[in-house]
Image (cartoon, grey):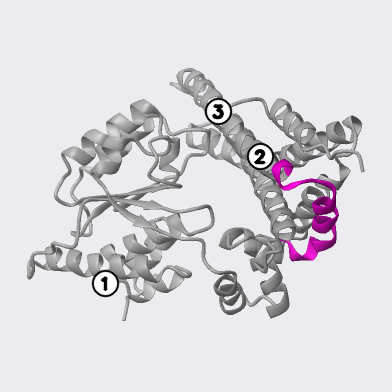
């Protein structure tokens, strides 16, 4: 039976087996009563969005730091889970990338002796956002690791575009899969107390993405945004309709970014000002004020890049929903009995299926993939989304 901390991984039995075995081996190393050959110093968690890469990394970190191998109840398990453990450092990019400066600092800290006498653990969420310089800094640390340091990287795939070949070759890869919708629904019901019928709908609508399923089940704004996105295909009957749909998608993403910025920016600014002694008088106050101005400019830069990232992540979720819609169109056209991703929009799916051919749908899916790639490479969202809606314009009935 696996450690309790791994219960939070949904539909990942194979990965749980590997991680549980490794955490037991790590305990042997700490206690000095075994070879611990199943444990290694660098791990790469890969899987599609929603598969639980970050959850798996944190659960593994809990098991490594826990004296009882991952009980889920002790202080170490709790502090790792909430992100306050002194020996667990979590790198979550707020902007579009992870800089070499950030990575060098994390690598420096990771070499310290752990305060808890177990492990120094570095979790890098979205390791595919490492810049080339950051990746090189990480590589050096992985090549010459401290005996008590463990690196846990999370990325969509092992493709060189996501993780460099040299970094990947020094990591043990743990592959995660999209969890079945029924497993996701069970978690929403048992963990979050969500009504069973709503949980089942959200799990299928989110296409196995656990976090998105919870948002759809609990947030009316998220449900309304999904409805707006899935109404797009049938609106693309004229150039005006294509342009209006693109504007609405972009405005929805910008609105989400503004809402998050309003909730975070001012408290961050006030906290920084207070920590730097804003409003102080006396000797050194002038120097402190000049230093504060520079720190505030740096904070504003980070907040701006975070807002850009939130906007593009929102657009990417919309594109995932559109991908599911056109996949459903293709399933209807070939007469497949596979369950539709957006079964609650079957009428719209069938209407589009009657108006276009399979070749058209395949080209449309390729165009959506190309648009996601364009957004990742910093193409202006307005240009990328407008080009997409134009390409998906329905032929005349």
Specify few, some or many for label 3: CA neighbours under 10 Å numbering under 14, 14-19, or 20 or more. Answer: few
Task: Tell me the tag on residue 69.
Answer: 1
The prevailing secondary structure element of the residues shown in magenta is: helix
Lower position in the chain sequence, tag 1 or tag 2: 1
Q: Which mark is in front, 3 or 2? A: 2
Where residue 302 appears, as percent x and y from the top left, is 54, 31
Secondary structure at numbered mark 2: helix
Where residue 363 appears, as percent x and y from the top left, is 68, 39
Residue drawn at the location 80% of the way across and 61% of the way down: 345
Q: Are marks 1 and 2 in contact (CB under 8 Å)?
A: no
Q: Nearer the viewer, residue 362 or 305?
A: 362
Image quadrant where one finds the C terminus: top right
Q: Do the residues labelled 3 and 1 touch (CB within 8 Å)?
A: no
Secondary structure at numbered mark 1: loop
Q: Is residue 75 visible?
A: yes
Q: Name the residue under label 3.
A: 377
Q: Mark 2 points at which residue?
A: 368
Lower position in the chain sequence, tag 3 or tag 1: 1
Spatial CA distance of label 1 from label 2 is 44 Å
Identify whether 363 is placed above or below 192. Answer: above
Where residue 178 appears, as percent x and y from the top left, is 51, 61
Tell me: 110 left or right of 94.
left
Where residue 116 appears, as percent x and y from the top left, is 22, 59
Residue drawn at the location 87% of the way across and 43% of the way down: 235
Spatial CA distance of label 3 from label 2 is 14 Å
Specify few, some or many for label 1: CA neighbours under 10 Å numbering under 14, 14-19, or 20 or more. Answer: many
Identify whether 258 is placed above or below 68. Answer: above
Q: Nearer the viewer, residue 303 or 266?
A: 303
Image quadrant where one finds the N terminus: bottom left
Lower position in the chain sequence, tag 3 or tag 2: 2
Q: Which mark is in front, 3 or 1? A: 3
* Residue numbers of the magenta segment: 342-360
């Amino acid at each position: 039976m696996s450690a309790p901390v791994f219960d939070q991984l949904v539909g990942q039995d194979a990965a749980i087996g590997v991680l549980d075995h490794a955490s037991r081996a790590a305990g042997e190393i700490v206690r000095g009563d075994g070879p611990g050959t199943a444990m290694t110093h660098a791990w790469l968690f890969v899987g599609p969005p929603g598969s639980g890469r970050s959850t798996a990394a944190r659960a593994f970190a809990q098991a490594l730091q826990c004296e009882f191998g991952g009980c889920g109840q002790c202080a170490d398990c709790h502090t790792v889970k909430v992100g306050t453990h002194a020996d667990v450092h979590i790198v979550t990019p707020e902007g579009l990338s992870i800089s070499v400066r950030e990575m060098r600092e994390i690598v420096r800290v990771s070499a310290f002796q752990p305060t808890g006498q177990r492990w120094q653990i570095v979790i890098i969420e979205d390791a595919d956002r490492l810049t080339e310089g950051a990746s090189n800094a990480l590589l050096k640390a992985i090549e010459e690791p401290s005996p008590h340091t463990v690196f846990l990287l999370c990325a969509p795939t092992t493709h060189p575009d996501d993780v460099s070949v040299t970094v990947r070759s020094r990591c043990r890869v743990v592959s995660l899969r999209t969890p079945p919708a029924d497993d996701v629904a069970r978690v929403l019901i048992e963990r979050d107390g969500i009504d069973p019928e709503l949980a089942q709908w959200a799990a299928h609508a989110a296409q196995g993405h656990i976090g998105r399923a919870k948002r759809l089940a609990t947030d009316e704004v998220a449900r309304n945004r999904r409805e707006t996105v899935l109404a797009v295909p049938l609106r693309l009957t004229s150039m005006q309709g294509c342009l209006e749909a693109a504007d609405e998608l972009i405005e929805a993403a910008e609105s989400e970014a503004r809402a998050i910025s309003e909730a975070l920016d001012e408290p961050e600014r006030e906290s920084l000002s207070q920590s730097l002694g804003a409003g102080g008088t006396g000797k050194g106050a002038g120097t402190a004020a000049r230093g504060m101005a520079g720190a505030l400019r740096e904070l504003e830069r980070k907040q701006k890049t975070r807002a850009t990232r939130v906007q593009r992540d929102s657009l990417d979720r919309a594109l995932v929903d559109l991908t599911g819609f056109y996949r459903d169109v293709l399933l209807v056209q070939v007469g497949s009995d596979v369950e539709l991703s957006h079964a609650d929009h079957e009428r719209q799916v069938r209407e589009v299926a009657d108006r276009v051919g399979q070749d058209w749908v395949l080209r449309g899916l390729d165009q959506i993939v190309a648009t996601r790639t364009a957004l990742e490479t910093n193409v202006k969202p307005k240009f990328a989304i407008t080009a997409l809606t134009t390409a998906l314009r329905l032929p005349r009935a």
